[in-house]
Every structure is written in structure tokens, then in C-alpha cells.
Image (cartoon, helix red, strand yellow):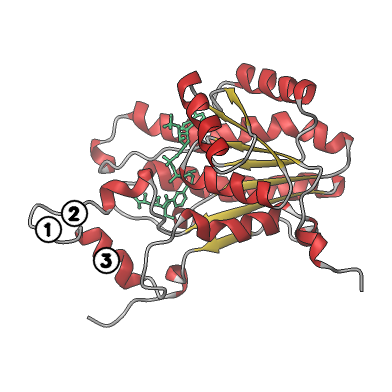
Amino acid sequence: MDFNMDSFRLDGKIALVTGAVYGIGFEIASSLAAAGATIVFNNIDQKSVNDGVENYKKVGIDAKGYVCDVTNEEQVQAMVKQIKEEVGVIDILVNNAGIIKRTPMHEMDAADFRQVIDIDLNGPFIMSKAVLPGMMEQNSGKIINICSMMSELGRETVSAYAAAKGGLKMLTKNIASEYGEHNIQCNGIGPGYIATPQTAPLREEQADGSRHPFDQFIVGRTPAARWGTPDDLAGPAVFLASKASDFVNGHILYVDGGILAYIGKQP
Ligand code: NAP
Ligand code: GCO
């Protein structure tokens, strides 16, 4: 048997995590660093990037940050070239950057719908297209797309986000299909409801001091009976970034406390 725990190590690997200044991306990048990876990340403006570098320093990680909007192909191609010159070829890409807009679909501006699709779906396409040549050249690579429960389910007010994340699930499967022969694995992580700035509005304390109704709903619908934390995604990310998952391809790993498996408790 060849297996040993070194299969989960990432020493010598360069990992680019998009939008990883805080939240899920920051936690995933930190876990990849803990497994030995060199971390590079991007965000859309210099202040965010500077904040990110400081955030990583606070946890002992010497991460390099780049100003880059994942929807801008010229910026993305230039960033990947700069990273190759300054750090090396990207071995692991985590398409984490994303936004959500919560609006009833019949009231949603088409421009807002397009923006969500642009960042959450076109962005991962542009980023993956940029790193694939380097991965093909070295005949190895890992792409991890941060999908969502909304890759499987819909709900009120998140039509653009669900369309984007549903598309991202299929983009994941297509990259896996098209590039598997180059020893490139593309998988997704589908977080459940995770406590980050993106979901803060769903957890806000009510004027009367009670918990937000949606907070109560999610906790009731989750077998784990709690919101997830970014830390819950660390192990799955290291697994999908490592040699340990070399025969896992086109898979969406849901890290949701069991909510997708659960019909819900009888009221
Ligand atoms: P978050 O706290 O809102 O962080 C998203 C990050 O992406 C922010 O740093 C943001 O930059 C950055 N970003 C946005 N647009 C960008 C662009 N065009 N180019 C580069 N960076 C950009 O989100 P999160 O909760 O950590 O979620 C991270 C990922 O997980 C997203 O793809 C989200 O859809 C997904 N997800 C989240 C949950 C959850 O419950 N939180 C569950 C499932 C999936 P700024 O700081 O400048 O805004
Ligand atoms: C929402 C939430 C969800 C989570 C996540 C669930 O408004 O329903 O923001 O979309 O972010 O994607 O997996």
C-alpha cells in the first residue's frame, strides 16, 4: 500500500485562492498553508489586498496578494503571468470570490442579475482558463470551485446566485471531463449555511432581541443544528487540493451539516 498521511501534504505547491481576504476564502487558504502550500490571493482593490496580507501575517502566513478583478480577463491573465514570474506556476486554484444579491426575481434589475453571473460564474471560467495552460504543461493541477447548496436548491430572492452556482457545478464537471487526461482534477465544495459577512443579514438579531427567523429556520433544517463556520471547510479543501484526491474528479463535496439530506423535523 502506497498511502500515508503525506498524501494530504501540499509542500512545494502554490495555491491561488480568489477573493481570500477574509471569510471562507481566507480560511481555506489558511488550511492549505497549514498543509504546506505557498499562498497567493487576489482582491479587487489595493486596500483589500493590503488588509489580506495583514490578516495572513496575524496567523503566521506569508501570503502574497494581487489586485485583480476575476471578471476582467486582461487583469487575470496578467496576474497569473506575474505570479509565475514572482512565485511560480499555480498548482492549486480555488475559485472562491463571489457575491450574492437577494432580490425577488420579478423586481431584480437585469444588470444586477448579470453582475452576479459575471462574478460567480464567468469569474471562475476566466480564472480556470488562465491557470490551465500551466497545469497542462506540468501535467498536474487542482481546481476547486466554491459552489453552494444553491447549486442544487432554489429559494426566494436568490435567482441570480442559484443560476450562477448551478452553472458553476456544471462548469466543474466539464473542466473535470475536458482536462482529466492532463492529471488535472476539478471538484467543487458546496458549503451549507456558513457564518461569514455574506450571510450576516440572515443572522441579524431582531429588534426584540430574538434570533432572525431565517437563522432559526436554518438551524432547524440542519441535522447538525448549527450554522457552519469557515473552519468546517478546511479539511475538505485540503483533501481536494492534495494527492489524496487524485482519483476524485467532477465531484461536488457538500459541507452542509447534512441539510441537503434532511427533509426537516415535523413541526
Ligand atoms: P464574502 O465574505 O462576501 O467574501 C467574498 C470575497 O470575494 C470578498 O473578499 C470579496 O471582496 C471578494 N470578491 C467579490 N467580487 C470579487 C471580484 N470580482 N474579484 C475578486 N474578488 C471578489 O463571501 P463568503 O461567505 O466568504 O463566500 C465565499 C464563497 O463561498 C463565495 O463564492 C460564496 O458564494 C460561497 N458560499 C458562501 C456560503 C456562506 O454561507 N457564506 C455558502 C456557500 C457558498 P470584497 O471584500 O471587496 O467584497
Ligand atoms: C442565502 C445564502 C446562501 C448561502 C449559501 C448556501 O441567501 O440563501 O446566502 O446562498 O450563501 O450559498 O449554500
Marks 3 and 2, how far apart at CA: 14 Å
The residue lying toward the viewer, choosing from 158 and 18, is: 18
- Residue 217's mark? 3
| Residue 247 is at least partly visible in this image | no
Assess disc 1: are there few (<14), some (14-19) or many (≥20) residues with their C-alpha within 10 Å of its C-alpha. Answer: few
Image vertical order of residue 177 relative to residue 2, above or below = above
Q: Name the residue carrying label 1.
A: 209
Across and down, in percent, residue 74 comes to: 63, 16
Q: Nearer the N terminus, badge 3 or badge 2?
A: 2
As drawn, the label of residue 205 is: 2
- The spot of residue 188 in percent (x, y) is 61, 53
- What amino acid is found at the position of numbered circle 3 in the picture? Phe
Q: Residue at coordinates 51% horizontally, 49% vertically from top-left?
A: 166
Looking at the figure, which quarter contains the N terminus? bottom right
| Residue mark closest to the camera, 3 vs 2 | 2
Label count reads 3
Tell me if the residue at label 3 has its CB under 8 Å from ligand 2: no
Q: CA distance from mark 3 to mark 1?
A: 17 Å
**Sequence order check, earlier mark of 3 and 1:** 1
Q: Quadrant of residue 206?
A: bottom left
Q: Residue at x 60, y 46 (%)?
A: 30
Mark 2 closeness class: few <14, some 14–19, many ≥20 residues within 10 Å? some
- The span from disc 1 to disc 2 (Cα, nearest Å) is 6 Å
From this view, report whether residue 101 is shown above or below residue 203.
above
Amino acid type for the residue under numbered disc 1? Gly
**Quadrant of residue 159 within the rendered picture:** top left
